[in-house]
Amino acid sequence: MKAKEVSLVALFVALTSVGAQISVSIGPVPLTLQVFFVILAGLVLGPKLGFLSILIYDILGALGIPVFAGFSGGIAHILGPTGGYIIAFPIATFIAGLGRGKVRYLTSLMGLLVIYLIGWMWLARFVGFNKAFILGVLPFIVPDIVKAATAVIIAERLQGNT
């Protein structure tokens, strides 16, 4: 990896960590800016480097570095109710990063879908299937679509594709 790529990967680890702290508690799953940076990482870095940046974020959190929402970290957090969302982040980043041009909107939404599906199924182990959907998916659909669309617009501007 080139120095610029290493720097960009590290930047998105840091941005995602900061985004996790911008949080509104609305139940077992907080509303944060993590998803925004997860999608943006894929769009800006591409699928491989984006995946790597968010995987590093997940690993740092799993090792106990307080990068998750509420300055939390540790393997217990990954194994807890919101762990599925965290596990889904690198996959979503990879999928979002596959898009070019107007397809970016679609791949970003597909990335969100992966986060929702994995997070929902994981959360359902703790609170049941229906309650997990109500608490862990439904309140996030509109805000996350806005975040994903904003990420696409920013990525296009950063890459000069306006």
Image: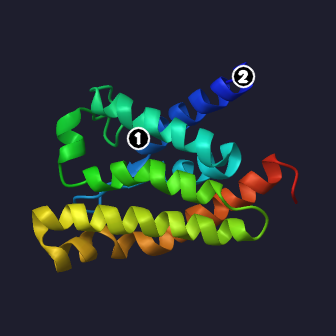
Report the residue at 26% width, 77% height from top.
134
Question: In the rendered image, which quarter is residue 146 located in?
Answer: bottom right
Secondary structure category for the residue under label 1: helix
Report the residue at 60% width, 58% height from top.
96
The residue under label 2 is which amino acid type?
Lys
Q: Which residue is mark 2?
A: 2
Q: Residues within 10 Å of mark 1 (few under 14, many from 20)?
A: many
Query: Horizontally, is 8 left or right of 146 in the view?
Result: right
Q: Which residue is mark 1?
A: 21
Secondary structure category for the residue under label 2: loop
Q: Is residue 54 above or below residue 100?
A: above
Q: Is residue 137 above or below residue 95?
A: below
Image coords of residue 16 (percent x, y): 50, 40
Q: Is residue 11 above or below residue 24?
A: above
Chain-order first, disc 1 or disc 2: 2
Image coords of residue 35 (percent x, y): 48, 54
Residue that protrudes farthest toward the bottom in the picture: 130
Question: In the rendered image, which quarter is residue 58 located in?
Answer: top left
